Image (spheres, coloured by chain):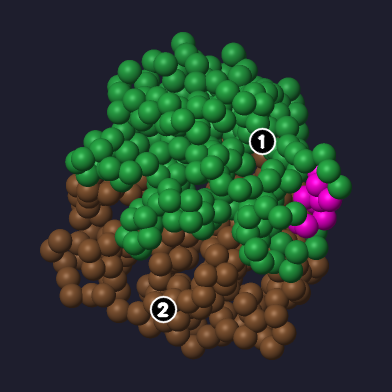
Chain colours: A green, B brown
Amino acid sequence: MGYRYELYYWPSIQGRGEFVRLALEDAGADYVDVARGKRKGMGIAAMMKLMENAARPPFAPPFLKAGRLLIAQTSNILFFLGPRLKLAPRGEADRLWLHQLQLTIADFVAEAHDVHHPIASSLYYEDQKAEALRKARHFTRERLPKYLGYFERVLANARRGGNWVLGARCSYVDLSLFQLLAGLNHAFPSATRRHQRKFPRLVALAERVAARPRLAAYLASSRRLPFNDQDVFRRYPELDDD
Amino acid sequence: MGYRYELYYWPSIQGRGEFVRLALEDAGADYVDVARGKRKGMGIAAMMKLMENAARPPFAPPFLKAGRLLIAQTSNILFFLGPRLKLAPRGEADRLWLHQLQLTIADFVAEAHDVHHPIASSLYYEDQKAEALRKARHFTRERLPKYLGYFERVLANARRGGNWVLGARCSYVDLSLFQLLAGLNHAFPSATRRHQRKFPRLVALAERVAARPRLAAYLASSRRLPFNDQDVFRRYPELDDD
């Protein structure tokens, strides 16, 4: 298609693909969001076809095509893109540390998803609402402050000379932490607001990310999909905690 | 401590640490399982202390100390160890592919764990048994065959000239697939036996892994902990499906 990177993800949600989109957008990368495209050879059918026919198939979207490489798993895609987009250094120690943090973010995102789908992804929310209500109490009171407290501590430990996870330079993990807080504030506004007060570094980091010129332009554009009730982060008021 | 690698993990379960142990054991690596040690500076207290005081702290065990590096997240540890233990090639494309598979195994392991803990890790199984029974039906009938079918397809697509995920040479992902099947056969013997018939490549792969000399010696040793009801894979007969 003539683009440097082809991103494949469900076209109607932010979901896990958004962590990759933020990195591509912040870097001003030359990419196309294939499943959202209207032209020939694009759309969901193109995504499904590649998933079915690839010699090294992804288990699920998102995945990224970069030349002859086809890379799946959100954190793996970001590990690959990091140095290429200048959103990660090239040194092994820093790259592994960023990846470790990204994998912990991924664990947290999976838990946030499972709050509204504790029994099975194949069932509607309405068919597992009783279980979701019960799980939500534990999530908002135990897991949410535990994870946010961990990332606050990581920021407090970060090298002097800057406010980012790695100190002086913004990385894809900083972008992902912004997205995490955006999702939590959408899905659990009351619980997140209450806990956030204890995590000022994290809140300030998210604000700095949102103010980056390319990111701000992206967030204000139609490329940034609104949250909705098919997404990983969903606002069901009964699952929030106040 | 004079060892090349220090592994930190809960001392009484296989858990996620076992995926790392299998790689270290298969390679005959010079390592110590710190939290299982009896000597001064070892044990759980040493693990907790490092977790609390590290400048770049892990969110949870397992983690690995290798010289000055402290690396957490099972898949990240294996990504690091792979080429060093000759259980992964050095080329980027193959390393990313193996890592992608390992992350998919990690997702599957998390789902298998959540079958017995669908509401909260902080509650006893007995306090979420009704929800676990419901989740187990979906896991054994939908998720288990979907994931195993995916890995079978990966093996069918693998390069000619060998029976491993990468073709000719065994990798840490092959070891992890063995562990996955071992865990599933322990936790869900009836459902796994029924589905396995459709996945002969995967079953044969697990047998080849178990027959590797160093692995066979490890599995027969006291270093290999038995499965138990504190582990990620637990045998609760009511959650199996027949």
> What mark, if any, has residue B74 been given in the picture?
none
User: Chain letter of disc 1?
Assistant: A
**Taking A234 as reference, is A158 above or below it?**
below
Find numbered disc 1 in the image and state the secondary structure of the residue it sits on: loop
Q: Is residue A28 left or right of residue A150?
A: right
Point out which mark residue A119 bears: 1
Residue stretch rendered in magenta on the structure: A41-51
Magenta span: predominant SS is helix
Q: Is residue A48 magenta?
A: yes
Discs 1, 2 touching: Cβ within 8 Å: no
10 Å crowding of disc 2: few (<14), some (14-19), many (20+)? some
Q: Nearer the viewer, mark 1 or mark 2?
A: 2
User: Residue B129: x and y, percent?
Assistant: 59, 36
Q: Toward which corner of the image does residue A53 lie, by quadrant?
A: bottom right
Q: Which subunit holds the residue at mark 2?
A: B
- The residue to which callout 2 is attached is B85
Q: Which quadrant does the N terminus of chain B fall into?
A: bottom left
What residue sits 56% from the left and 47% below the top?
A29
Q: Amino acid at mark 2?
A: Leu
Residue A24 seen in the figure: yes
Amino acid type at mark 1: Ile
* Disc 1 with disc 2 on a shared chain: no
For numbered disc 2, what is the local secondary structure? loop
Residue A157 in view here: no
Percent position (x, y) of residue A212? 43, 31
Instruction: Name the residue at 54% across, 42% down.
Output: A28
Residue A63 lies left or right of residue B213; in this view the side is right
